[in-house]
Image (cartoon, rainbow, N blue to C red):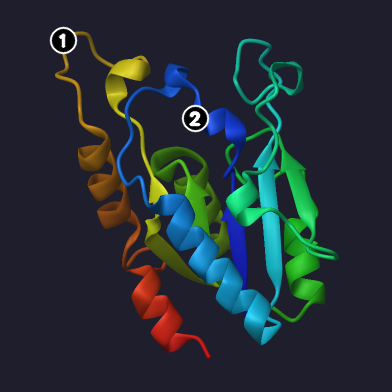
Amino acid sequence: MRALVLIDIQEGMDSPLWGARNNPDAETNAARLLARFRETGAPIAHVHHVSKRPASPLHPDNGGTAIKAIVTPRGDEPVFSKSTNSAFIGTDLERHLRDSGVTGLVIAGLSTPQCISTSMRMGANLGFDVWLAHDACAAFETHAITTWRDGLPPLSAQQIHDTEVSMLHGEFGQALSTDAILKAYP
């Protein structure tokens, strides 16, 4: 059985602090996946980041921790709060998935090179068969973050996204479009 894991699709991700991003349709595609998983009764897990850094848009005092309305959890859909890049560290996500009989994941959310990548890698390392909905994720450009070496040219959000998805595909799971996932999933 495969579960949908939506990660960090939060109001704080719209902050200009992050810089320009690619894929303005990421949330819409995540909502399409969510609708299908709800329709079929498949397991769903929502994960949101609650930063410990006071300046972060995802810190509780800054109003950005709320999950966006387009993918708002319903009823008994569990919400896991994290403060690291991995959806599995410091949460009961793995236990919840295992108790639900889940062996595979569909991961979507923000941002591709941080929490999505870390969660996909860890999910695969924990033995889950992971599908990354690459068009239901997005990245931010590098000039909004500190680069590791002075003088590096800025990378666009699309370059970062494409590079990260390429690194994940095949090694930690499969990168698939939302349409391909919807076709493959009853």
Q: Which residue lies most toward the front here? A: 69
Q: Residues within 10 Å of mark 1 (few under 14, many from 20)?
A: few
As drawn, 49 above or below 131: above
Q: Residues within 10 Å of mark 2 (few under 14, many from 20)?
A: some
Residue 179 position, x and y percent, is 36, 75
Q: Residue at x 78, y 63 (%)?
A: 77
Residue 60 position, x and y percent, is 75, 23
Q: Residue at x 45, y 41 (%)?
A: 111
Asked if residue 76 lies left or right of residue 184, the reply is right
Mark 1: which secondary structure? loop
Q: Quadrant of the N terminus?
A: bottom right
Q: Could one spot residue 57 in this view of the protein? A: yes
The one nearer the camera, 31 or 99, is: 31
**Cα distance between the residues tagged 2 and 1:** 28 Å
Residue 147 position, x and y percent, is 30, 17
Between marks 2 and 1 in the image, the one whose residue lies nearer the viewer: 2
Residue 29 position, x and y percent, is 44, 61
Asked if residue 113 lies left or right of residue 118, the reply is left
Q: Amino acid at mark 2?
A: Asp
The one nearer the camera, 136 or 80, is: 136
Q: Which residue lies most toward the bottom here? A: 186
Q: Amino acid at mark 1?
A: Gly
- Residue at numbered disc 2: 14
Q: Residue at x 45, y 17 (%)?
A: 17
- Residue at numbered disc 1: 151
As drawn, 61 above or below 118: above
Q: Could one spot residue 172 in this view of the protein? A: no
Mark 2: which secondary structure? helix
Tell me the number on the disc at residue 21: none
